[in-house]
Amino acid sequence: MKGKYGIDLSQKKVIINGRLENYIKSNGWKTFSEFMNAVEKDRNQEKMLVNLLTTNHTYFMREFEQFDFLRQEILPWIKNKEINTKDVRIWCGASSSGEEPYMIAMVLSDFFGIERKKWDLRVLATDVSTKILKQAIAGTYTAEQLANVPAQWKRQFFISSAGGNKYVASDELKKGVIFRQFNLMSPFPFKRKMHAVFLRNVMIYFDDVTKKELVQKVYDLLEPGGYLLIGTTETLDRSATPFEIVRPSIFRKKEG
């Protein structure tokens, strides 16, 4: 997991046991070693290992002050910069079950308003887990999960089902997000630079060397003046990053 995906589980033996033990037994392997032999030979088993060992905890409106900053500061900068191309490039690098990229898409729609059809506002959303991406693409959430979403957004972007107990993201909202499976440790395949990268609450699983390398890759990927947003409880080593700090969890690449 660390070698291929950057995820350091060396202090998480109890979690590993808890998440793998039943799966291993129910699929006929007698030991962890037998299972790992299968993982090394079978790409599908490797995917299953990643699905079982990655944590996907998120919710709508999480750390909303960052979405406020997106609306108040980042989007006006992008709009001014790309007034001719009408192209907004935002990447959510740990999309989990979809709440975060859908939130970004709602903010984009709200900000651009009646002009939104003239702009390419699609958000790229990636995650290493194929299982969680299926949930994100389905875009189905309980009423409880949407409890903190503003009523206007709920009406505009979600369709009520199951007697009001479940909500499904509208086709318009789904079209605003492109979901892809991607390992952050892989070389970045992007042809064009990003205006903003959301990499929230994912680097807590990486050691300092892995984190530093990833942050540098993101820096190189961003347009001059572009933004990196991380989780509000996360930190970057200020002495080891070329980013300028805007706020404790918001960083900017130098302009020009």
Image: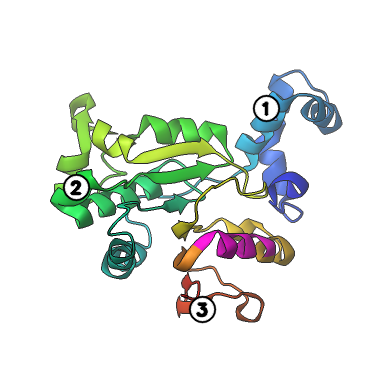
Marked residue nearer the N-terminal end (3 or 1): 1
Of residues 81 and 65, the one nearer the viewer is 81
Q: Is residue 41 magenta?
A: no
The residue identified by callout 3 is 244
Q: Residue at x 46, y 44 (%)?
A: 125
- Disc 1 marks a residue whose amino acid type is Tyr
Quarter location, residue 35: top right
Look at discs 3 and 1 and give the one toward the viewer: 3
Label 1 Cα neighbours within 10 Å, binned few <14 / some 14-19 / many ≥20:
some
Marked residue nearer the N-terminal end (3 or 2): 2
Quarter location, residue 177: top left
Residue 78: give its label. Answer: none
The residue identified by callout 1 is 23
Q: How far apart are the alpha carbons under marks 3 and 2? A: 33 Å
Look at discs 3 and 2 and give the one toward the viewer: 3
The residue identified by callout 2 is 153
**Left or right, residue 56 beside residue 11:** left
- Disc 3 marks a residue whose amino acid type is Glu
The N terminus appears in which quarter of the rendering? Answer: top right
- Disc 2 marks a residue whose amino acid type is Trp
Q: Position of residue 87 (x, y in %)?
A: 34, 51
Q: Give the residues in magenta.
A: 213-222
Q: Position of residue 173 (x, y in %)?
A: 28, 39
Picture layout, residue 24 above or below residue 81: above
